[in-house]
Amino acid sequence: MRIFKILLSVFILLLFASFIFFKKGAIACEMIGQTHFSQISTNLYVDDSLDEAQKSNLIEAINDAIERVSNVYGNPISSPRIIATTENRYSSFGFNPTGMQTSGFFRECIFLGPKGLKTDVIAHEFVHAEVSYRTDLLVELTQLPAWFIEGTGIKVDYRRPFLLENIEISEEDLAKVKSIFFLRDFPNTNVKYYQASRIAVEPIHTKSLYSGLERLNNGEKFEVVFGL
C-alpha cells in the first residue's frame, strides 16, 4: 500500500509539472496582475522597460491594429489581454522577441516582445486571438490547419515580405504548407511558409471568416465551409 501511495504521489507530481510546462503561457497570462507588470488600461499590461512615450505609441498601435482587423474581417469581439515588454528575458514564460498569441484559462492572451510593439504584429496576433475565441476547442484542434491560422493572421500583417506584390510562391511551396496541420509543425522562422499561408487563404472572402467559424462550431466541415 505504501509503494502504491508513493507511485500515486509521483504520478500526480509529474502530471502537475507537465501541466505547468505546457500551459505556462496561459498561467503567466492569468497571473500577470500579481507580478511587477502594471495595468495601464483594461486589457493592457506592461513592465517598467517601456517609458511613457513607448506606452503611448503602443496604445496607438493597438487601436490601429483593431481598426485594421475590423476593416478586413469585421469587428473583433475577443478583447484579448495584451502583455508587453522591451526585454528578452521572459521567453520562458511565453514571450518571444516579436509576438505570440495563446489561450488563457478565461481569456485570449497576446504577448508582445521588443520587436512586436507595432501595428502589423499586433493585428496579426489579434486575428489569432479572434479565431481562437470564436472557435470551439474541439473545432480548433481538429478542423483548423496551421496554414489557415497563420494565413488569416498574415493577411492583416503589412510588413514588406507579406505583401502580395512581394510574394512569389511555387505550387510546390503551396503544397508543402498545406500539408501542415498542427501549429507545432509549422516552421515559424521560415518566411516562405508564412508567404505560402498568405496565398493559401487568398480565396476566402474576408468578411465571411467569422460566419465560417460559426458554421464549423455547428458541425460543418472545414473544406465545405471555406472551399479550400
Image: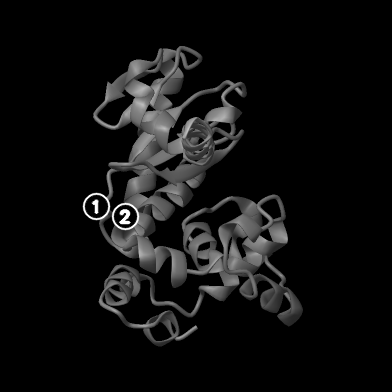
Percent position (x, y) of residue 115? 59, 33
Circle on res. 52: none
What is the CA distance from the residue labelled 1 to the residue labelled 2? 8 Å
Question: Foreground: 129 or 3?
Answer: 3
Tag 1 residue = 77
* Quadrant hosting residue 216: bottom left
Residue 134: quarter of image: bottom left
Residue 133 shows which numbered tag?
2
Horizontal side of residue 138 vs 144, given as left or right: left
Where's residue 151, x and y in %? Answer: 53, 64
Kind of element beneath mark 2? helix
Question: What's under tag 2, amino acid-wise?
Answer: Tyr
Q: Is residue 205 visible?
A: yes
Asked whether disc 1 touches disc 2, contact meaning CB atoms under 8 Å apart, the reply is: yes
Name the residue located 67 percent from the left edge and 63 percent from the top edge. 193
* Image location (x, y in percent) of residue 198: 57, 67
What amino acid is labelled 1 in the image?
Answer: Ile
Q: Which corner quadrant of the image does residue 56 belong to?
A: top left
Q: Does residue 112 appear in the picture of this structure?
A: no
Q: Earlier in the sequence, mark 1 or mark 2?
A: 1
